[in-house]
Image (cartoon, rainbow, N blue to C red):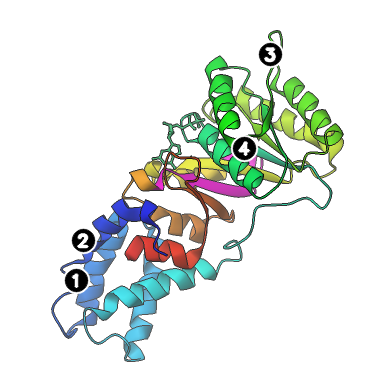
Amino acid sequence: KVNDGLKKSRERLARDLANIVQGGRIEELEEVLEELEEVLITSDLGVDTVDKILDDLRAESRAQRLEKREDIKNGLKKSLVRILEAKSNVGVALAKAESPPTIIMVIGANGMGKTTTIGKLAARLRQDGSSVLVAACDTFRAAAVDQLEEWVRRADVDIVVPKPEQKSPSGVLFGAVEKAFEGKYDYLIVDTSGRLHTNANLMGELQKMVRVVSKFKENGPDETLLVVDASIGRNAVAQADTWKKEVGVTALAVTKLDGTARAGFVVSCVDELDIPVKLIGVGESIDDLRDFDAELFVDGLVG
Ligand code: GDP
């Protein structure tokens, strides 16, 4: 099933590819590849990833599977799937602890779609029959807590919010982890503050939160999910590296893929970062969250 959330990216790629994939037999492969290179780079694929694609197409040509220009689209799809599946980080499911609760800490700069992603994820886990507790640990923004409460109502799960005098995210988290164990919840999803990652205080606070979880679970959170907005394109790769060094990131959720024509960068994210993309957001509704699947993604991107 083609993923309609990638419609904008697919339309742009199709438009940019239109001239390349029409016109019968390929006379000069390298000339065609040069045109293709430009299209792929403007689609936010990184240079290294594009090089791999061009090499794959040269191999296809040698194997005589690339004779007509229209074959380029299939060659491109095959190559993208190959590149994605070559990574052990593709198709990895979201962590599930052997003994509950599974603790998922969700981090990311403000505006990336953290609250929305938590709401969608909570709803999905709930629909699958799990009990879910959400910890609203963004004590810096009252509005963030309100917004999260709204999502939690829709998802039909439970929430822990800061008490009026509570200003420490770690304090809220401690209470929430206790409640998750006592209430035998299957999942605890932790919302965190998302002021910009250049803020040393924020990193310090997040590290403290990891230590709080470590008091209950030797290895800390089962998953530290970084939420990045697809429309920031390749900047997300650099951002993810920083968060990984400072707090540790075990998985990425890429949001707003429906709102951008830059979905191609996800391929480079997978190719360049040693962090699995586990979830993608393709809309604003509660059911617009998907697992990352290489073939579905490439179908959605290339059509
Ligand atoms: P936060 O500040 O990181 O918690 O971000 P929010 O969850 O509040 O999201 C910011 C905006 O992005 C909101 O208007 C959301 O509706 C929107 N948003 C989040 N995820 C998606 C998505 O996958 N697709 C689209 N189109 N919008 C999204």
User: What is the secondary structure assignment of the residue under circle 4?
Assistant: strand
Sequence-wise, which precedes: disc 4 or disc 2?
A: 2
Label 4 sits on residue = 106
Q: Is residue 5 magenta?
A: no
* Residue 121 on image: x %, y %: 59, 43
Q: Residues within 10 Å of mark 4 (few under 14, many from 20)?
A: many
Task: Using residue 187 as the reference point, say whether residue 55 is left or right of it.
Answer: left
Quarter-of-image position of residue 158: top right
Q: Inspect this view and state whether residue 44 appears.
A: no
In depth, the one of 149 and 239 nearer the eye is 149
Q: Is residue 248 magenta?
A: yes
Question: Is there a contact, CB below 8 Å, between mark 2 and mark 1?
Answer: no
- The span from disc 2 to disc 1 (Cα, nearest Å) is 8 Å
> Label for residue 167?
3
Sequence-wise, which precedes: disc 3 or disc 1?
A: 1
- Mark 1: is the Cβ under 8 angstroms from ligand 1? no
Classify the position of the N terminus by image quarter: bottom left
Classify the position of the C terminus by image quarter: bottom left
Label 1 sits on residue = 20
Q: Which residues are magenta?
A: 243-257
Quarter-of-image position of residue 246: top right
Question: Is there a contact, CB below 8 Å, between mark 3 and mark 1?
Answer: no
Q: Amino acid at mark 2?
A: Asp
Name above or below for residue 225 compared with residue 28. above
Label 2 sits on residue = 16
Q: Amino acid at mark 1?
A: Ile
Q: Amino acid at mark 3?
A: Lys
Identified at 61% across, 49% down, the residue is 251
